[in-house]
Amino acid sequence: MENTMESYDVIVIGSGPGGYVCAIRAAQLGLKTACVEGRETLGGTCLNVGCIPSKALLHASHQYHELMNHMPKMGIAAKSVSTNWTQMLSYKNDAIASNTKGIEFLFKKNKIDWIKGWAKIKSSSQIIVEDTLYATKNIVVATGSTPSSLAGVEIDEKRIVSSTGALELRRLPKKMVIIGAGIIGLEIGSIYARLGCEVTVLEYLDHVTPGMDRELSQALQRTLTKQGITFELQSTVQSVEKLSSSVKVKFMDQKSGEHRSHSASVALVATGRRPYTEGLGLQELGVSIKEGGQIDVDENFSTNVSGIFAIGDTIRGPMLAHKAEDEGIVVAERIAGQSAEVNYGVIPSVVYTHPEVAAVGKTEEELKESGQPYRVGKFSLMGNARAKATFAAEGFVKLLSNAETDRILGCHMIGSSAGELIHEICVGMQFGAAAEDLALTCHAHPTLSEAVREAALACGDGAIHS
Ligand code: NAI
């Protein structure tokens, strides 16, 4: 053990979107900050094996799909089109590297020390990394989450993979069985289906993407089915068997009660994630942790042990990078004595399939259940000129507003660039906007954003183009 102990105001454990953003904000506020990360690069799951690599492969496979399907109709034809999976992986790796290096640069710029290694919390004011002790006034746990597999199913990241292995398969599989129709299953399924792989998704529930507005989830399933993905809903996967060169996924068909199976080259287990909080020494210190690993925190993100905070996937709420980022900023500001809070009512959610799916606020099902009177303004992209001119007319915008006050309660859309369009609604909701506020705002023509305005008009006297 070293004698001279480096000491900090804040040590953040984990450099994912929650952790690195927290470290930057703390440093901006004048706190002496370090971030512990054991991976070789900064950025956590999102940058290294999650959001960024999946978006790179979704982008590449989408370009291929466009070239095969829409571009010839626009007069653009290539004599021979081929895909090179190795090159795609290398493009994806470059995308990861440029982002992880970007965080390293931001750490240097903000004078944040990167402590390399895996941290163990010794007390609320000391951590140990690779046998070195560090002192700190505050600890922020931002260690994220890890895939949670099914009982008895061992992920080898080669043939039985989690999202991590699915984003670095050495060869394009001929057939893939995906267990779970959540966001991970559908995004990764889209990549492989576009590249010619036969994709079957087995889902326990009778619908895809649990928690999503039902009309949207049905539209998404329809469109992905058209793209060649097969769905077997109400299927309970029970085991995955590794054969000499394939895998056999056994499931129970809830409708018939029959036991069936699908063989494939690769099985992706996409049945959710759980907080990654083991091995940090939290239990030994008496930090309150729920079964499953979720850390209990109060409104300040403080655990029951003073000086230890937790954010992101390790605590309650949706496991989303941007939710973690917001919590990282707020916890840093609170540690610095400022008041700040996360607006959990306005956290968008995006599925990066094509078309994209984006949502914020209450779903129609939630409003029905609460008994709150609401209005629905729906506008099909078929009525949007820009969408029609660019093969993007599939989808709709559905805006939900309070029937008495007209205040926006939620928005659910499926369509090209929905993940960008949703932010107009987020800003509106943050400011407490009414649907009429959007309807009265001039939107440039021709843009896809006009569909949002039309949905707002549909909450009132009616859209113009429908
Ligand atoms: P999920 O919890 O969203 O979906 C898992 C699905 O697996 C559920 O529909 C569940 O019913 C099904 N399932 C569970 N056990 C099953 C069984 N035995 N047989 C058949 N089906 C079964 O989890 P997912 O997709 O793994 O995502 C994990 C987390 O990562 C989520 O919180 C998600 O929001 C987040 N994420 C977000 C992304 C984004 O914002 N674009 C991208 C990727 C992940």
Image: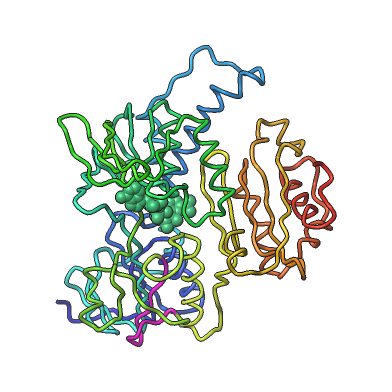
The percent position of residue 367, horizontal first and vertical second, equals 62, 64
Q: Is residue 270 visible?
A: no
Q: Could you tell me what secondary structure mostly forms the magenta stretch?
A: loop
Q: How many marks?
A: 0
Work out which quarter of the rendered image holds the N terminus and state it: bottom left
Left or right of 72, for residue 235: left
Work out which quarter of the rendered image holds the C terminus and state it: top right
Q: Nearer the viewer, residue 33 or 431?
A: 431
Q: Nearer the viewer, residue 55 or 174?
A: 174
Quadrant of the rendered structure where residue 33 is? bottom left
Position of 160 relative to 277 (above/below): above
Q: Which residue corresponds to the image point at 72% horizontal and 32% vertical from the top-left?
A: 388
Left or right of 299, for residue 400: right
Q: Nearer the viewer, residue 211 or 123?
A: 211
The percent position of residue 348, horizontal first and vertical second, equals 57, 59
The percent position of residue 48, horizontal first and vertical second, equals 37, 50
Q: Which residues are magenta?
A: 301-312
